Each structure stands twice: as structure tokens, then as C-alpha cells.
Amino acid sequence: MGEKKNEMTRRKFVELGVKCIASAPLVSGLPNIMFGSTSVNYLEASNFHGVCPRDCPDSCSWEVKVQNGKIVSFGGDKENPFTAGKLCVKMETFPEDITYHPDRLLTPMKRVGEKGEGKFEPISWKQAISEVGVQLKETIAKHGSESVLSHGYMGTQSIVQKTVMSSRFFARMEASNIAHTICGGAVIPANFEVNGTVLGVLPEDMVYSRYIILWGTNTKNSNVHQWPFVLKAREAGAKIIVIDPFVSATAKEADWHIQPLPGTDVALALGMMHVIIHEGLVDQDYIDNYTSGYKELEEHVKLYDPKSVSGITSLLEEDIIQLAHEYAKGDPSLIRILVGIEHNYNGGDATRAVAILPSLTGAWRKQGGGLMHLTFEISGQALNWERLNYHRQMPTQPKRKLNMVQIGQLLNNPDLNPKIKSVFIYNSNPMVTTPNANLTKKGLEREDLLTVVLEHFMTETAKYADYLFPATTQLEHWDIGDSWGQVYVNINQPAIAPRGDAKPNSEFFRLMAQEMGYTEACFKETDKDIVKSAFDTDHPYLEGVDFEYMQKNGWVRYKIPEPFLPHAKGNFGTASGKCEFISPSSGLPAYKKVVYTEGDKNDYPLQLLTIKNTKGFHNSSLANVKHLQEKEGRLWLDIHPVDAKIRDIQNGDELMAFNQRGKVILEAKVTLSVRPGVVCMPHGFWPSLVKGGQASNNLTDDLLTDIKKWGGGAALQDCRVQVAKV
Ligand SMILES: Nc1nc2c(c(=O)[nH]1)N[C@H]1C(S)=C(S)[C@@H](COP(=O)(O)OP(=O)(O)OC[C@H]3O[C@@H](n4cnc5c(=O)[nH]c(N)nc54)[C@H](O)[C@@H]3O)O[C@H]1N2
Ligand SMILES: Nc1nc2c(c(=O)[nH]1)N[C@H]1C(S)=C(S)[C@@H](COP(=O)(O)OP(=O)(O)OC[C@H]3O[C@@H](n4cnc5c(=O)[nH]c(N)nc54)[C@H](O)[C@@H]3O)O[C@H]1N2
Ligand code: SF4
Ligand SMILES: [Mo]
């Protein structure tokens, strides 16, 4: 890091010139033990800006006050209008839940037991890096550099610890990279096919919308700081529609919840188009000027009359017609999507069909009208990516990308050339977060595989490490938090010294680079230098903003021209500059039946949803935090009374949900939140912390979505199971 640990903690508030938060109340619930002395000397207190590292659209700004090296106050930044002083329930006690968690990994460890047994002995950083280096060099000499796999994901989405140094390291090595497909792997390429961008309506502009469809997104849980904008729009007269096969927390608040069968959204969207076109509710002028493929679409949607769509979706014909009418007449109408719509075989085409709707009705013409999806293209332009993505300029490059959805298959495939002989897992917990986990387990049990894991905790995946390195948390390292769900960027200042022997991911890769003899200057850059370089930009979105500004203010909203009407006059990012109803590579969107074997259909008659239906867990993170576990209770399965009755299941019964891949023990919740034929289990629980030792992704299939541009997304929800009383 090139910086003495204590420097930051001693630095005075005045020196930093940070906004004064000395009068902010101490965060309640933080144990005294954490504060050290309770007599607080504010004069010695230092204040730090930070950002939530979770893979979340909100990217909340936070403020930390430190006294004598201990955190005395932690909370959302009140000045930031989007965060509005509030972190979500998962993160408001982050310091004690993660940084000071008694089970936190604080020293490097080497495996001494069987793979997966979780038996380790401590080892020094120096020795561990040296031993990994020796084995890595041997592996590369024997099997080539592509036999090494970099498996990093979104445990932290802050840029420095997510990617910068690791990307340089693996580019220099010419290792294999994991393709990041499990979240956005269908929905992003699909929207790009239609609109040439995923940037549409800005989050704050939702207040101008008067008909809002939250399509397969659970805003109240997964995008909590967007919810106030939904409410403001409603106060101003907007109608709120939720399209979701499950009665989510958000669906419960909707003015109208539409509950199709999972994976049938493409048919519903095409059905809406059928009605809109048939009844002349299109904006012909917009279509003529700014779109292509209308004639073919008009012909195509004849197949999707309300009766046929009702047959596919199980929705009432009159509901499909009413939705189409109301949507077309909304003034303006907005569709909000994130990733709920993509996690099924039809996910790509569902996105394409939904992404066409605003152009058919000309919804883009008005502020608050159109499609609201992702915002990362804003920071993608504004920050200095030439520096952040320096690895792309290196003369050596990773040559092979392997799809993370099928990590189990990849680790077990004897014909893969070269076979994966070493895997580096960081910011990622594939044993819990990727499908077909029992196959992944089999792969990670391979004696001939060198597994290196960087983690905060002994996760299900970490147990399979040969070498396990303790990573710092967001309170202990520098970073930059951009966002894919709003339009602010944050600096993250280290507020306290790393606990124990923990080091930032970036430092691990610097040390590994040194060990491997990689002498390039890029491996010498400190995290602070990287953060500085990001703001060394003259992009108008960051006019007047530099590192010093960020040090003082912590965050800034990109200076985006107002009003932001990206497609009021077309201006799409496609090759033609038009909204492309027909994609040159994928044609017109269409509903496709998932092909199951006869065995699957007969033996496993229920469709299983495994969704982010907890308040306390964030993907697999925080599922080992006691007070959050207590809030969630025991792992459960939502089952419709009809399906329960056939199986003689009562509320509270202990159940087994099973298929050819796994078996999960959980509690029955007999409820109308799912339709007959569909069951639903929350995702995120750690298998080892639930009875029976298996959870959601021990059942899910590693089936890919329709659109394969990035290799294929995850059709997680196309999973069939049988359920029985234990
Ligand atoms: N069945 C089912 N599966 C799903 C989903 C679903 O809805 N259903 N959702 C999918 C989605 S959308 C996503 S994004 C993925 C998420 O998949 P992951 O990114 O794998 O999930 P997380 O639990 O967020 O993070 C993984 C690990 O990163 C670690 N971590 C956090 N910060 C750091 C750090 O600074 N350094 C290091 N070294 N480690 C760190 C955490 O401790 C955690 O164990 O899961 C997918 N899987
Ligand atoms: N509390 C909490 N918040 C989170 C996360 C978390 O783990 N916990 N994870 C973060 C991450 S990584 C992401 S990507 C975002 C995701 O945020 P969202 O896009 O909101 O994604 P999900 O929660 O996966 O799914 C949202 C809804 O989609 C529904 N759904 C499932 N299948 C279908 C379908 O076929 N059609 C339709 N119309 N709906 C369907 C589910 O029932 C669910 O209610 O949330 C982020 N925020
Ligand atoms: S998880 Fe999301 S909502 Fe919660 S504090 Fe972090 S960024 Fe904010
Ligand atoms: Mo995600």
C-alpha cells in the first residue's frame, strides 16, 4: 500500500476539510467494546467518507467517525440526496457485522485437512505467497497460463478492490478469465441489441412518470432508495404496477399486481404489442423516424393474441388487454427492469420485447417516460477508465473466457483444453451463489486443483481453499464506488487500520506479481494513486471535480445535462442509430418453451424460484450474521395450498425439496404468494448453516439463457423440483 496504517486514523478532521459530523449521534447498537473508552474526545476524532461496497443499485454514501483508531459513529451520509442519510437494514451495523465480526479471517491459512473439511493452520503472508508462487509457476510450466482461472465477482463492487490490480495480474499472466454472466448476462446484451445502450430514464426522473411498471424487480427490497421516488410519483397521480410471479414485498404495495407464470414475460410483452398495434395505440411518427423493423414486428405479434398469451402466462385475457391499454395511454409510462426478468431461458428475449415497448408508444418523448435500467454508462464515460482499465493496454491479455454459470461443469470437464489446474477466487462465493453447487463442490474437491481464496469469512467456498488469505473490508481500504443504479460517484477512505493481518485484494495481487517476477510499473501503483487517477479526467460530467474535491466531499452527482431525455429524438446507440425491433443477430423476440426431459417433467413437477427474498442477506453475504439470521428465521418454502394439499403438507411442516441435483430441508409456508405449480425459496442462506447442509443453488440448474452474446446468462429460475414431507 505504501502507506503507514496509522497515518489515516490520526489525520485530523480539519486537515481533511471534511464536512463536520461531530454532532452526529453515535450509531446505536455498536457494542462499547468496539469503541474502547466511552469518554469521547471529539477533538481527536476523524471523519471519513465511504461508500457501501455491496453489489446493489443504490451505492449508498456513508460517513465514519473514528476515535483512537476505533469507529465511534457509522451511518448513511445525510447530505447525499439519494442516500438521504439512510443505509438499508443489511448495512446499518456493518462495522460490527463484518469488520469486527468474531469469525472474521485475520491471518493467512494453509489447508491441513481434506478439501472442504475446513481444517487449516495459520501461515505468514510471506510464506503463503511464496508457496502459492512456487505451485503457480509449476502449473504454468506444465499446463500453460490458461490453466489458471481468475474467478472474481461482485462481493465488492467498488472498483479498486473489485478489479484493478487483479485484472493487471491475470492479463500479465495470460490466464483464463471468468465471464461475469450470472447477473446481467442476458438483460444487458439484450437491451444493447434493441437500444444500443442500457442507459434510459434516470432514477430521480421517475417522479415525472404517471404509469410505472416495476417489471420483475423487487424495488422495496433490492433497490430501497428508489422506492421513495415510486411513492413520490404515486402521490403525483402515478399508478404502480408490479409484474412478478411471486407476491414480493413490492408486489404487496402495488396498485395492481400482475402475476404471470415465471419465464413468460416475453409472451406478455408481445401480447401487449399485439393489442397496442391492433388498436392503433402506437406512436406512428416515433416509429417512422426512430425505429426499424416495425412491419416485421407487426406481422410477428399477430401470433401473440390475448388468448394465446393467456395460455402461456396463465393471466386473464382481459388483464393483458387492460395492461396494454393503460400502458399505451400512460402520460408518460415508465418500465423499470433490473435482473429479475432475465434469470430464465427466455430472459434475453423477454428483455428485448420489454425494451421495444417504449418506442412503440413513443414513451421516450417525455421526461419520466421510457425504460429505466442501468446507469453504469455514465461513470463509464466520466471516470478515467484509461487508467482504471490499464490492463486492457497491456501487451499480454487473457485469451480464454469461461462462463461462471457453468463453473461446476468447467471444473469437472476432462476435455477442457487446457484443464483448469488452479483457481483464484475473490469477491465471490460460487458454492452458494452459482447454480448446480454440488457439481462445483465435486470440482473443488479435485486433489490436482490449486485453489486460492481471498475472503472475510470461512464461507462454503473458502473451505475448499488450499491457501486462504484474509481480505480487508470497506472500512480498511481505499476505493471508488461508482454505481449501476444511480448517478453519483463516491470515494472510499480507509477509516481504520486493517484488522489482524488482513490486506486489500489489491495488495495480495501486488505481492503475487512480485513473487511471479512481474516487474512492470503498474504493479507498483498504490490504491490511493489509483483512486486519484480515476478523477484525473476532464469529462464534463465531472467538471471541477478532482481527487481533492472527492477527499473533501466524499461523493458527487455527475453533472448530467437537464432535462435528460436520451431518446426523445431517437439517438439510440445501435449501429443504425434506431431502436431495432429486429436484431441482426437474434431476429425478433419470441417465446420458447423450455425443453425438459420426460423424467424431469414427471418426477419434478414444480417450478422452483430461488429469489433474493430476504431483508437481511445480500446475495450470500451477511447470512452468517446472527441478528440478521434471527430476523429471517429458518429456511422456508412458499407453496400454494393446492400443491400443499396434494402432498398433505401443513404450514410449518418440515419439508424436503429435491431433484436430481440436490436435496434441501426447509419449512413449509402454505401461502397464496405463489401460483399453483410454482414454489419459492429465498436465496442467500449458507448451506452449512441450515439443516441438511444444502440450500438454493444445490437445486438450481446451470442452464443458460437464450442470448449468448456474453456466453449466456443464468436460467436460475428454470428449475424443477418435487416436494415432500420429511
Ligand atoms: N439461486 C440464485 N442464485 C443467485 C441469484 C439469485 O437470485 N438466485 N442472484 C445472482 C446474482 S444477481 C448475483 S450478483 C450473484 C452474486 O454472487 P457473489 O458475488 O458471489 O455474492 P456475494 O455474496 O455478494 O459476494 C461473494 C463474497 O465476496 C466476499 N467479499 C466481499 N467483499 C470482499 C472484499 O473486499 N474482498 C474479498 N476478497 N472478498 C469480499 C463476501 O464475503 C462474499 O462471501 O449471485 C447470483 N446467484
Ligand atoms: N435485499 C437485497 N437487495 C439486493 C440484493 C440482495 O441479495 N438482497 N442483491 C442485489 C443484486 S446483486 C441485484 S442484481 C439486485 C437485483 O434486484 P432485482 O432485479 O429486483 O432482482 P431479484 O431480487 O433477483 O428479482 C426480483 C423479482 O423478480 C421476480 N422474478 C423471478 N422470475 C421472474 C420472471 O420470470 N418474470 C418476472 N416478471 N419476475 C420474475 C422475483 O420473484 C423477484 O421478486 O438486487 C440487489 N439488491
Ligand atoms: S446494500 Fe444497497 S441499499 Fe443497502 S446500504 Fe448498501 S448500497 Fe445502500
Ligand atoms: Mo446481481
Image (tube, rainbow, N blue to C red):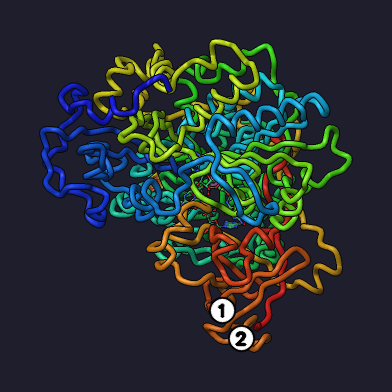
Using residue 388 as the reference point, say whether residue 94 is left or right of it: left
> Mark on residue 222?
none
The residue lying at 41 percent from left, 63 percent from top is 626
Question: Does residue 386 sit above or below 601 in this rendering?
Answer: above
Residue 228: x, y in percent?
32, 50
Question: Does residue 115 sit above or below 699 in this rendering?
Answer: above
CA neighbours of label 1 inside 10 A, class few (<14), some (14 to 19), many (20+): many
Residue ID for mark 2: 649
CA neighbours of label 2 inside 10 A, class few (<14), some (14 to 19), many (20+): many
Residue 222: x, y in percent?
45, 52
Q: Amino acid at mark 2?
A: Ile
Q: Is residue 266 visible?
A: no
Residue ID for mark 1: 668
The one of 723 and 67 positioned closer to us in this rendering: 67
The quarter of the picture where the C terminus appears is bottom right
The residue lying at 65 percent from left, 70 percent from top is 664
Q: Name the residue furthest right.
A: 415
Using residue 74 as the reference point, say whether residue 664 is left or right of it: right
Q: Is residue 478 visible?
A: yes
Disc 2 to disc 1: CB gap under 8 Å: yes
- Compare marks 2 and 1 and give the one earlier in the sequence: 2
Q: Amino acid at mark 1?
A: Ala
- Secondary element at image label 1: strand
Residue 128: x, y in percent?
59, 34
The residue lying at 35 percent from left, 42 percent from top is 208
* Quadrant of the rendered image containing residue 132: top right
The residue lying at 74 percent from left, 73 percent from top is 605
**Mark 1 CB near ligand 2 (8 Å cut):** no
The quarter of the picture where the N terminus appears is top left
| Distance CA(mark 2)–CA(mark 1) | 7 Å
Residue 262: x, y in percent?
64, 61
